[in-house]
Image (tube, helix red, strand yellow):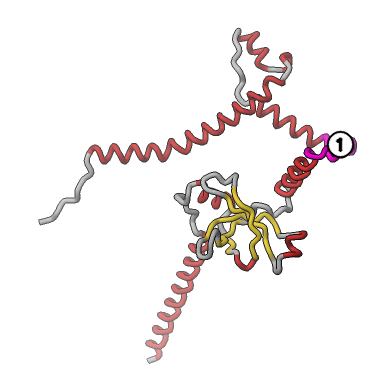
Amino acid sequence: MTAHPHKPGLFAKLRAYFLAGILVTAPIAITAAVAIWFIELVDSQIVPLIPGHLNPDTYLREVIGFSYGLPGLGVIVLLVFITLIGALTAGLVGRYFVNMGEAVLQRMPVIRSVYSATKQVFETVLKQQSDAFRQAVLVEYPRRGAWTIAFVTGNSKGEIKRLLDGDYVNVYVPTTPNPTSGFLLFVPREDMIILDMPVDEAFKALISLGLVTPEDKTGIKIAAETAMRTKDEIDGALEDLKKSGHGN
């Protein structure tokens, strides 16, 4: 007597549909919420600074009869402003004013430390030839035998390089699920395991508490190459058997 497979009930189907709906809508909703929060935050700071005769909302109020509030206006103005500042400072006159402003800031005891540190961080991260946060690695932390994902921020230099014996690397170990806080470690290069996964995939693993595991593309490639070599070896052995059979 053949046993019929158990069919899921109505409640099980509804539960599966509901979970499938969450998988589709939750990432979209969270992304939209973060985007809306960022746009509203920037707009609330930038739009009030726009003169009334330059604000498009003024003309809409005159035409439509009520204020609508264009979403994203502050973001657009901020992007244009930053781009114009970059274009001006690229010239000789703009560079002169920047240097003069930096000279004034360097004379302020507390401000100069904050400004110098902030400028150096941005120059290091945004520099096109920088290696900061472009390599994900595994390091043993917080004890031997326990490994965590970290990001290379550069080679150890200066006094740290002089005092430490060997080739050391600066690595940033972020906390989970908030990677904006973490720890700076100076790790011997030979004690790191370099990961092939991109930095954004490593961040996904951290933020998701390990629930999202990046695909091992290198392992898949090695397995495919091994399978091809095995197939070629089997084909070669079969061909040799055929030849030896014909020879006999």
Callout 1 crowding tier (Cα within 10 Å): few <14, some 14–19, many ≥20: few
**Which percent across, then down, holds residue 214?**
50, 54
Quadrant of the rendered structure where residue 79 is? top right
Residue range of the region highlighted in magenta in the rendering: 88-111
Question: Is 125 drawn above or below residue 229 in the view shown?
Answer: above
Viewer-proximal residue among 184 and 15: 184
Q: Residue at x 86, y 36 (%)?
A: 104
Viewer-proximal residue among 20 and 143: 143
Viewer-proximal residue among 147 and 208: 147
Query: Could you tell whether 142 is left or right of 154 in the image?
Result: left
**Which percent across, then down, holds residue 202?**
55, 52
Is disc 1 placed on a helix, strand or loop? helix
Q: Is residue 91 visible?
A: no
**Which percent across, then down, holds residue 41?**
61, 28
Viewer-proximal residue among 179 and 67: 179
The residue under label 1 is 104
The quadrant of the image that shows the N terminus is bottom left
The quadrant of the image that shows the C terminus is bottom left
Q: Residue at x 64, y 52 (%)?
A: 133
